[in-house]
Image (cartoon, rainbow, N blue to C red):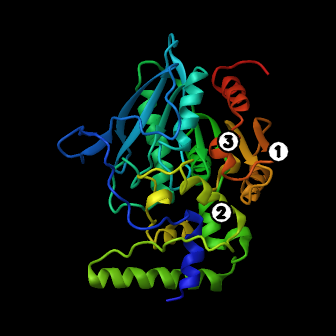
Amino acid sequence: MKTANLKSATIAALLGLGVLTACTNSTTNQKTSDNMETLNLTQEWDKKFPQSDKVNHRKVTFRNRYGIMLAADLYEPKSAEGKLAAIAVSGPFGAVKEQASGLYAQTMAERGFLTLAFDPSYTGESGGEPRNTASPDINTEDFSAAVDFLTAQPHVDAERIGIIGICGFGGMGLNAAAMDTRIKATVASTMYDMSRVNANGYFDAENSADARKQKREAMNTVRTRDAQNGTTTPGLPAEIKGDEPQFVKDYFDYYKTDRGFHARSVNSNGAWSPTMALSFINMPLLSYIHEIDNAVLLIHGENAHSRYFSEDAFKRLKGDNKELLIVPGANHTDLYDRMIPFNKLEKFSNQTLNNEQL
């Protein structure tokens, strides 16, 4: 097995250390029907940001069209009157709703939107087996399932729903916007194209048939061994040795320190399935983003290693309702918490969802 190639295929997921541990906070069981799995939902405030006194918060669940039950946090402004514009938020890739997506959601709720931060399938408090895996199809569907949920809420205007995707879920969000015409506005913040990075490597340095063949062979060797042994191989551990690229150190600064560590986050306290990248290699995510008619805002840090994903995606978008914002001085993870341009997010969302004039 060519370990180096397997590492290359999965480094984009920022593999965590060890095995995901069970949360020790108080939980509640939530089951919507006899045929659905039961989710254990933590009721304590265990977010990586302070709870706002300007919004109401509650845990909710909904399922996608594959039958997977998703767990989410619903944030509603206390001053809300009438039907509101709504925004579904998810990401970063390997994070949970208690981290960056929850911060985005709560802050946008403070600014007048009903928001929903959800854990994608197979991660966090959401359902799905096996754990700690991802799918370009199912995770795109997760956004549309969130839209389903929001359209059924009595305080939501179903014609004014947007989404925010962060990191790898920025790419999933763009893919969802190309498919789901109900999404009237899309924000992709510090976006990754997970198909491209897994198929071609970082900066397209492994964009060859031979390199992809080696990755596939390595991952399928793992699949065969697991099938024969009846086991599941844990993901490769990631360890900081000091000579890693700066962006890997930036990830660790967020996920492995008190700044962003959360026990349910794959990147903080777990490991992605080592065969996860197989489907991403074969299924390009952004094939039809040039057909997105509704508004799109791409946000990226000036110094982010991943900036080329947004710049290249922006070149393919069509229409005068598409924007690319480069945040001066920001790296990839700065847009998780430290340098989020919330004023721009509010302005864009008001223009596209609340029909405010430029």
Residue 160 appears anywhere in the view: no
Front position among marks 1 and 2: 2
Q: Quadrant of the C terminus?
A: top right
Task: Find residue 11 and report its horizontal and vertical position in percent.
Answer: 58, 69
In the drawing, does residue 232 fall left or right of residue 109?
left
Q: Residue at x 50, y 56 (%)?
A: 94
Task: Find residue 129 and report its horizontal and vertical position in percent.
Answer: 32, 60
Name the one closer to the observer, 170 or 283. Answer: 170
Task: Find residue 213 and report its horizontal and vertical position in percent.
Answer: 57, 84
In the rendered image of this protein, does residue 289 appear above or below residue 272?
Answer: above
Secondary structure beneath dot 2 equals helix
Q: Are marks 1 and 3 in contact (CB under 8 Å)?
A: no
In the rendered image of this protein, does residue 123 appear above or below residue 319?
Answer: below
Q: Residue at x 76, y 35 (%)?
A: 321
Q: Quadrant of residue 293?
A: top right
In the drawing, does residue 230 fall left or right of residue 238?
left
Q: Looking at the picture, which amino acid does disc 3 mark?
A: Arg
How far apart in space, not on screen, are marks 1 and 2 (Cα)?
A: 20 Å
Q: Which residue is mark 1?
A: 328
Q: Looking at the picture, which amino acid does disc 1 mark?
A: Pro
Q: Residues within 10 Å of mark 2 (few under 14, many from 20)?
A: some
Q: Which residue is mark 3?
A: 338
In the drawing, does residue 299 fall left or right of residue 337?
right
Q: Are marks 3 and 2 in contact (CB under 8 Å)?
A: no
Sequence-first tag of 3 and 2: 2
Q: Which residue is mark 2?
A: 249
Q: Residue at x 78, y 42 (%)?
A: 325
